[in-house]
Image (cartoon, coloured by chain):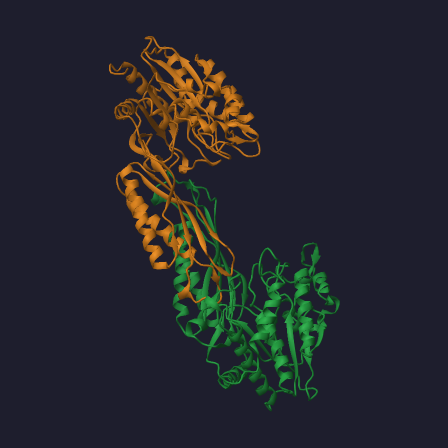
Chain colours: A green, B orange
Amino acid sequence: MTNRLARADRIAADIDALAALTDPDRPWTRRAFTPRFLDGRAYMAKAMADAGLDVRIDTAGNMIGRRPGRVPGKGVLAVGSHSDTVPDGGRFDGIAGVVAGLEIARALRERGIELDHDFEVVDCLAEEVSIFGVSCVGSRAIAGVLPEDWLVRTADSLTLAEGIRGVGGDPARLAEAKRSDIAAFLELHIEQGPVLEAGRLDVGIVTAIAGITRVEIAVAGRADHAGTTPMTTRADALVAAAELVIAIERLALERSLGEAHFAATVGEFSILPGAANVVPSSARLLIDARAERRADMEAFLADLAGLVADIAGRRGVAIAEPRRVSDNWPTPSDAGLLSLMETAADTAGATHRRMASGAGHDMAFFARIAPAAMLFVPCRDGRSHSPDEWAEAEAIALGTDVLIETIRRLDARQDTE
Amino acid sequence: MTNRLARADRIAADIDALAALTDPDRPWTRRAFTPRFLDGRAYMAKAMADAGLDVRIDTAGNMIGRRPGRVPGKGVLAVGSHSDTVPDGGRFDGIAGVVAGLEIARALRERGIELDHDFEVVDCLAEEVSIFGVSCVGSRAIAGVLPEDWLVRTADSLTLAEGIRGVGGDPARLAEAKRSDIAAFLELHIEQGPVLEAGRLDVGIVTAIAGITRVEIAVAGRADHAGTTPMTTRADALVAAAELVIAIERLALERSLGEAHFAATVGEFSILPGAANVVPSSARLLIDARAERRADMEAFLADLAGLVADIAGRRGVAIAEPRRVSDNWPTPSDAGLLSLMETAADTAGATHRRMASGAGHDMAFFARIAPAAMLFVPCRDGRSHSPDEWAEAEAIALGTDVLIETIRRLDARQDTE
């Protein structure tokens, strides 16, 4: 064990305090734009100030704690994530990253460590899918890519613009949230998967955030009387769709055995008419596919098209061309940052591996405007977006030390702008 | 073409007249217990009377038209089906059988054919699943097996008892609807399947009404993040359930290639949580299995149990023991009636084959109290319970002739009680 800079007890105290700010009947819920979220933000603002940071809220509603560097104009080394949760969500997803940022500020001050760069902790607004049906509101704005028409989305008799104003932002001046002064962005996050725990590793060095492509498939068969229609003359949409589900899993499984992360899931599945005595006439599937490498996604989509044609032909059902509901490419981490984080992990005494993130994160938007990378810490049983989500404060503290070491090396590096 | 007794034009006129009595915005709908149903009953009462029948409504709400025979105490030769429809249902399902009965009465009178037996046309109340959620209300009462507790079922602020009273029955004296005087019951019905049409056959001699067993299966997997959970560590309830669907179809297909009718359909299928980015945690299937022979059903259920154990073991999901939601045994037709109908079909010049009914019918309840059998006539594309349901009046007339010939032979047969 090396000499730790980050303190697990302080991290645990922050996480417990934020967890307590939950809708009481459905722990742990603190959704963006709700009064509970503002309670969480008030806690964050005080904690940032106590850590010696200058606290502000940008025009997009992100809360930013800043510690000026010794050398003006060197740019900002930023650490961040989000403090909002999904409904019934966990106590660590996002929160661990913001608290790690806070603890970095405390540790730097405690040890008297000065940086040439400015240092910022960023609590990004509404990373999770919010009441407005959209996610990563704050980090999109920081990257300058928040769609203008999202501002008029409404929920609970509010527009998103009003929601941003309610957390202290100024949507009329949204463009000012865009940053061009960030020298590097780092995000610590729980893995939300079982890989680190299974490998008994301390941290994951995240090579990329996987691209996410969502594909809808509609199968049209023929409704027939379940009692009187011979098995040989049916066009059963459910059976055809079930073949698709099995084949999609097989394709994804094969592809996932390669070096790069790949997964595909049919998460939405429904049939019509859904009557006990009627052969199903139609089925709808929504596939969520995630690939670290775009080439893998393209190959999967090509395989899927072949699969659909084959099943439609054999089963006498009509399957429309798979429709891409959304299609986001992978976001690779900055290669230089990856090497630096590996060295930092070795220095901090943290065992590590490279791995992709199957989930989306704020980092994907920071990567559009700055060198960016992520660090995963293990979580229990890979559980996330669940009340059972759990990560040890010691594990978060060790990850925080890796970030501190990374920041010190970044700060000292000659080529950092 | 032999000399026809039944007239297709009169049959077509009845069917058209009843079809016109539909909820205007959703043809062809005349559900039991509705005002529209009473309009249909009024038409039937007049048509029965015009055919020389004495019309009454029994205590269970069945409408019965009676023509006394020459020899008291020989019993009743009854022909019947039902005049109610499913929502958006067809013009022929049930109606064809009641109209065939009417036409028999007209043809017998027209030709001056007297019978020793009494002859009755029975319009059974509520054969289709009614607003009260139950079916075959009238024929169950005739068999004395209408569950007493059904009478307090409610729908549209009515109890079933009140519904029966509303159509002219007397639920307090329901037991009096039970019959012990029926010498034979015959039901003509559209096939509701494609077999006769495909074989270019005039009529089907129905060997049995298949047993219907409904089985519910619940698959419990584990909800996981669709992006971060490796394909190899999932317990995906949907994929396991999809394997079940495919295997159930294979089992049913193999069994259906034997001599006796067999079919199995997964008509209800749902998953939870049904979110794009979450591996499905649970799935529910409802299987509708139909077998002409009980032994086939037992074998299918045994195979199903093995299947479930296999998939649960391989996939790491929990599948509860399949639950029999309902389990009705097959109802064989009376063997003597089958032979008689075949001879009658030959006499009437109708090509025929033996076949099972995959659907349930009023005949299944008459079979509990009397020798009973059914005759199928072809319908277009096997469509039924659909606005597209269609049968040619000529085809119904030919089937009616087969019934008339059957009735004459029954009436003449010495052994008929």
Q: Is residue A257 visible?
A: yes
Q: Is residue A69 left or right of residue A204?
A: right
Q: Is residue A145 left or right of residue B312?
A: right
Examine the rendered structure and indicate whether residue A70 appears above or below residue B323.
below
Q: Is residue A363 visible?
A: no
Tell which of B47 and A22 is nearer to you: A22
What is the quadrant of residue B100 in the picture?
top left
Q: Residue B84 at what x, y percent from top left?
A: 48, 28
Tell which of A3 and A213 is nearer to you: A3
What is the quadrant of residue B252 in the picture?
top left
Q: Residue at x 43, y 13 (%)?
A: B53
Examine the rendered structure and indicate whether residue A90 appears above or below residue A369.
above
- Figure quadrant of the N terminus of chain B: top left
Tell which of B395 and A151 is nearer to you: A151
- Figure quadrant of the C terminus of chain B: top left
- The residue at the far bottom in this view is A414
What is the quadrant of residue A59 in the picture?
bottom right
Tell which of A292 and B156 is nearer to you: B156
Total number of numbered discs in the rendering: 0
Examine the rendered structure and indicate whether residue B298 appears above or below residue A393.
above
Q: Residue at x 35, y 11 (%)?
A: B113
Q: Residue B411 at what x, y percent from top left?
A: 30, 15
Q: Residue A201 at what x, y percent from top left?
A: 45, 76
Q: Residue A328 at what x, y percent from top left?
A: 54, 68
